[in-house]
Image: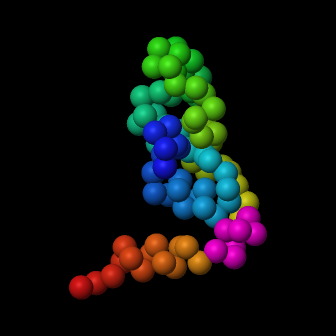
Amino acid sequence: MGAHSPRHVPKDYIRYRLTGDRAIDMADASGTLMLDVTNRRWSSEILNGAKIPKEWLPTLHESPDVCGKLSKEGADANWFEDWHARRCRRG
């Protein structure tokens, strides 16, 4: 990944791989300290001050929202099986 590539928490990365959609829930977004919690949006003041383009950030969603549909690529890929096997081996 390049210097300005999107970063994801694990569950958001899995969602991205399955759907192709970059999304984050409000709880995780608040942990970035870039969320305007009162208005439930990315803080323009913080983003502008840090020179972070809003386009770099995922779409905001409330935790129970449906925020993507399984893509054909996500359904056909075997990456999850490989990823899971590497992280869940017992030794």
- Name the residue furthest bottom: 91
- The kind of secondary structure the magenta stretch mainly shows is helix
Q: Nearer the viewer, residue 74 or 25?
A: 74
> Residue 90: percent from the left, percent from the top?
28, 84
The magenta segment is 71-77
Residue 73 magenta-drawn?
A: yes
Taking 77 as reference, is 27 above or below it?
A: above
> Residue 50: percent from the left, percent from the top?
45, 19
Q: Nearer the viewer, residue 61 or 18?
A: 18
Residue drawn at (37%, 73%), measured in percent from left and top?
87
Residue drawn at (60%, 56%), measured in percent from left and top?
16
Taking 9 as reference, is 48 above or below it?
A: above
Q: Quadrant of the C terminus?
A: bottom left
Q: Give the quadrant of residue 79.
A: bottom right
- Name the residue furthest front: 2
Q: Taking the image as drawn, is residue 24 in sight?
A: yes
Q: Give the quadrant of residue 72.
A: bottom right
